[in-house]
Every structure is written in C-alpha cells, then in structure tokens.
Image: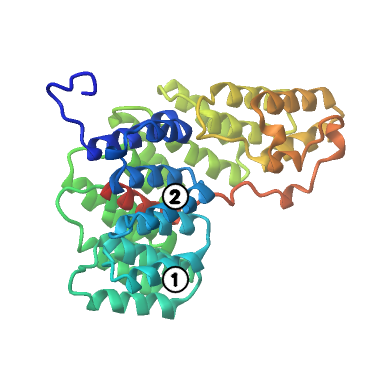
Amino acid sequence: MNNRPERFRISASDVAIQLDLIARVHGVSSAEGFFLNLTNDLKDKRTYGALLNAYVHSRSREKAESLLEVMRSKMYLIHPLPFNLMMTLYMNLKDYDKVDMLVSEMKKKIIRLDIYTYNIWLSSCGSQGSVEKMEQVFEQMSKDPTIIPNWSTYSTMAAMYIKMELFEKAQECLKKAEGRILGRDKIPFHYLLSLYGSVGNKDEVYRVWNNYKSMFPSIPNLGYHAVISSLVRMDDIEGAEKLYEEWVSVRSSDDSRIGNLLIIWYLKKGKSDKVFSFFEHMTRGGGCPNSTTWELLSEGHIAEKRVSEALSCLEKAFMTSNSNSWKPKPIKLAAFLKLCQDEDDMESAKVLIELLRKSGYHNVEAYAAIISKDEPSNRIENIDDVDSENMDDDDSQVLFSQVDSSF
C-alpha cells in the first residue's frame, strides 16, 4: 500500500494500524522509530493512541504516562479509549488509586464512560476487596442510559466475588453473564467454564460444556483448555483425562498446554510414575512438548532425586524456548540446585547456571536471589520463599482484550 500511492491514500487510521502491527511483531522500540519518522499530518489522536496501546501492552509505565501528558497537551484526550488503556495498565500494575483518578478526570471533563471503562472500574474495585464500592459502581453503571451491562461485566463481577469467597453472588452473576452471550461468540464460554471451576461447581461446568458443544460444530483448543483446567482444579481427574482423549481425537492443531494441565495435577498429587507414563502417551499421540512440559518433567525427576535426568529436561526446556512466553520458574531452579547440593553434584549445578547466564537470566533479580555467579551452592534460598507465580494477571485479560479490540 505504501509503495502504490497512486492507488492507496494512506490515512492516519491506516498508519495507526500499521504502528500497532509493528509493535506486535517487532517490538515497542521499532514502533517508536516508526512513529518518530511519521510526517506531522499523520500524527494525530489515532497514531498517538496506537503508540500508547503499544506502551500499555509492554507495561512501559513511564513512557505511557509521559505520552499521555503529551496527548493531554494536544487535547487528544476527548474519548474513553486512552483512559481505558491507562486504566488497564494500572490494573495490571495493581495501582488501583490511579484507576479511580482517571475515572474522576473523565467525569470532570465530561468524557462519557463506556462499557469498557465501567468493566475495568468494577474490576479495580473488586481487586481492592471492596464489595460495597464495586456494587456502587455497578449501580451507577445500571443507571447510565448509554450502557447495557454485557457478559464481560457479569463475569468480571463473578471473578471478584469468587476472590472474596462470595460464591452465591458469583453464581448469580454467572447466570446473568450466560444470558448475555450474543451471536456465535465462543470466548464467553471459556470464562464461564473457568469461573464455575473456581466456584467448585462441577455440575455447572459440565452443563456449560455440553451447551457449548451443542451450539458449535467444533470447539477450539482454548475451549478444551478451559474445561480441562476447571476439572483438574476440582480434582475430577477422570473427567479431565476423558476430555483430553476426546480433544486428541478432534484437535486441528497441537497445544501442549492442555497436556501440561494433567501433568501438573499428577505432580501435585505426587504421582511421578503417572507423569512419565502420560508424557509418553502424549508424545506417542503426536503431542509436541513445550518448554513448560520439560520444566514439569524436571520437577518429577527432582522429586525422585534423579539429577542428570532433571538437568536433561531443563536443558531441553531452554532449547525449546523460542519466545518470551516461557521463563524458568525460580522455585523449580531452586529445587534443582538444592538437589545438586544434597547429592554433592555441583557440576550439574554449574551447567544450569551457565544456561541461565547464556540466556541472560542471571542478571534478573528473581534468579540472582537463588544463585551466585561464582559459588552456586552458597545462595540457595528456602524454596518456599521463592515465588515466581506472582506476575500472572489473568483476571484483567478479558478486559484488556476487549479494550484492545476497540482500538
């Protein structure tokens, strides 16, 4: 399109989409370079919004806040989207006071709160553990004549009620969410399956699953992941195994995350033999293990005090990783290093540390806390104190995905 100006007149809206794609494929720095090279007539609220979106995706707080100030000075903050993006960023960073401040700014400037604004605001209130505040926001939302609460609204409230162990209120919201699913949208079913699993209502999980299957001729991998994840959480391993076999028979593409759910359950229950037999079954059936699979297998070998086998799995985990989606969990590495120390096998510990160095992880605080550059046996922390799971922010993902799609 850019190379055929006689046919295509590139607008600021087109450029905003291109900037967004560049950020997704090549990263934020490439998107910044693209933005800086734009002519002034193409730098408007849309292209600024696209760059802000890129900063929010990468959780670049300082850059996002700086850009927002520029957008304020240019009078570009006249619609909800940039506020929604920043609110999502603050939600992911757990800075809930900033969410309230942005809502106040919108009201002061008489900028209409849209459905996404309300949904993020509800999630922020619930994340602070304030049932009263969340319900007040919902009441305000219900009185807004421009807003009709959607399935995301009720699933967000259900998730917050579950966190506060108000399960009856959560299930009331889930019923309302189900009643607001429109058209042929599959995504709401994934959230219903997951949230009913969190409530612990197995009957509802199966009911929603059967309803889901009756409505669609094929179920995507994410659907099977959602239902199997819920069944595993409720210790219905027989049901999970049955659905895994069903998925294998109908899948259009492999997804090792689904098999990993079962492996995690076997490990949690101390069934190491089952871990390895299932892994063999998975690979014989065409499953391709990812980095997390190999890391989980290493955990099984660590439990059985098999140093070389555990190291081999960790090496394969590093080799298989080809993106930023996997990072070794410090708690697993700490367990391996402790085993090396217990078994007086510091050569294996050195191999792992070299892997961390080559991958650049030894400079990251979470990993530096459990290893020493020169004396790996001296810096092994209490495994219970090492937590690598605290960066998961799935609660706001449904909100983020919807805000992002509105861009």
Please tell me whether residue 359 is drawn above or below residue 112 in the rendered image: above
Residue positioned most to the left: 7
Front position in the image: 149 or 10: 10
Q: Earlier in the sequence, mark 1 or mark 2?
A: 2
Query: Which quadrant holds residue 258?
Result: top left
- Left or right: where does residue 168 sit relative to residue 312? left
Count neighbours of disc 2 (C-alpha within 10 A) and say few if under 14, some if 14 to 19, many if 20 or more: some
Residue 354 at x, y = what percent? 74, 23
Which disc number belongs to residue 125? 1
Q: Is residue 171 above or below residue 216?
A: below
Mark 1 is surrounded, within 10 Å at the Cα level, by few (under 14), some (14 to 19) or many (20 or more) other residues, namely: many
Element at label 1 = helix
- Name the residue at 83% across, 32% down: 376
Q: Position of residue 281 (x, y in %)?
A: 47, 26
Question: Which residue position holds label 2?
Answer: 67
Q: Which mark is residue 380?
A: none
* Three-letter code, disc 2: Leu
Q: From the image, which quarter does the N terminus lie in?
A: top left
